[in-house]
Image: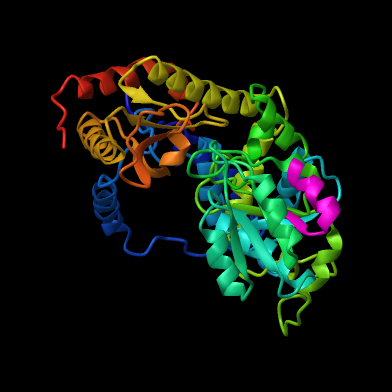
Amino acid sequence: MTIFERGTPALLADALDRLAEGFGDLPAFDAEIPESDRMAAVLNDVAVRLQDNYPYFHPLYAGQMLKPPHPVARAAYALATWINPNNHALDGGRASTAMEIEAVAEIAAMFGWREHLGHLTGGGTMANLEALWVAGQIQPGKKIVASAQAHYTHERISRVLGLPFEKCPVDRWGRMDCAALEEQVARGGVGCVVATLGTTGVGSVDPLPEILRLRERYGFRVHVDSAYGGYFGLADNLAESARAAFDRIGEADSIVVDPHKHGLQPYGCGCVLFRDRRVGILYQHDSPFTYFSSKELHLGEISLECSRPGAAAVALWATQRLLPLVKGGEFAKNLSASRRAALLLAGRLKADRRFVVPFEPELDIVVWAPRARSASAASAASQWIFDEAAKRQLHLALTRLPTSFYADAWPELERDEEFVLSLRSVLMKPEHEVWMDEIMERLRSVLSLERPHP
């Protein structure tokens, strides 16, 4: 048995023959591979170099948000590279452009949008940049507000765009504090509020219904950054507060989701969507050579990026053809399994007095800390567990959480530092649920060792 599936290369070979049939009327030419006699050695060197990685694809990797692409995505992406389409203009990728439009429409439909403007990007950062750029064009010079737990990219993007930025405090669950938000927007000058539906740190879901209520009163744009959590609207086991947020996501002005996270795609594949198609006029530009082959829409006309890999669109289209984005489908069931795994891990950790879980996971990210006298001692213990678990092929992650997050679950903690270095697990793989016994067994084997006490 191998840890890598090996069936897709054969399927890819058959698909490559089918692809070649579409170009059978071309005169033959020598398609031999230059330096083919040395390729095997080079590829073996690549394989050896790639061994210097954590096993992101394995269920014992329960650290950062790294999820293996679906085999059909890998194969479709590779197949497209024989053509190597560029989805900037139809000249460079007719079929892949059509596939992108179809795949993006399916993502928009997941949020309840039949009419939209959107496209794929190189990732969530570029997608968020476009959304905030549009916000700045519509309300020039006005402030961007995001929660203190929002991704750092929003502050960085605001600086790039020359827009003022302000953080909004969060509650003890890591969600945007809407009372504090109202104070901020009441002072005026806020053009866009970023609601994060699935923070990358702890997986918190901002209270979108309350944010939308404030929009009605104060008139700012609402951008939903669901780069990480966007697909969870399809899950059937969300808590009430998260469900309420995802049920209202279609009322946002713009949405970002990353197919290269829960969408089973290779990096990089982000997606930005706008509810109002008229924002497309903001992208207008002249090009001397790329837009004369067709009167139809060129995706480069509604994107800040120029050249973009058509292979990413092909891979996404193929994956969504195999696994439609519908509630109750296989794709949705896998999301529910990831959340069940997170609830299972959180429950087992809470049942062990040696750990403290500050709050129940809203999606599939669990954060916790080893119980200790003080914040500094807990931080040292977290680092030790992280190091020792990795020696046993259990790969976790670390994150710095405010001690205030532990106020209810850990009132006796001595707050000698502002933050607690905590352990974090992103249980993105549906296999994590069935591997939970093995994960806990390896964690217990770490705890059986003598733990240093500062």
Q: Is residue 194 above or below residue 279?
A: above
Q: Nearer the viewer, residue 368 or 454?
A: 454
Q: Position of residue 362 (x, y in %)?
A: 57, 31
Residue shown at the point (52%, 36%) measured from the top left: 70
Q: Is residue 291 above or below residue 276?
A: below
Left or right: where does residue 223 sit relative to residue 361?
A: right
Image: magenta residue range:
210-223
Residue shown at the point (26%, 22%) measured from the top left: 442
Q: Nearer the viewer, residue 273 or 407?
A: 407
Where is the N terminus found, in terms of image quarters? top left
Quarter assignment of residue 296 = bottom right
Q: Nearer the viewer, residue 339 or 271?
A: 339
Where is the C terminus found, in terms of image quarters? top left
Q: Position of residue 203 (x, y in %)?
A: 53, 38
Q: State whether residue 103 appears in this view.
A: yes
Residue shown at the point (52%, 65%) measured from the top left: 29
> Magenta region's main secondary structure?
helix
Left or right: where does residue 298 sit relative to residue 129?
A: right
Q: State whether residue 67 appears in this view.
A: no
Check the image and tell me how it is coloured: rainbow
Left or right: where does residue 4 sit relative to residue 445?
A: right
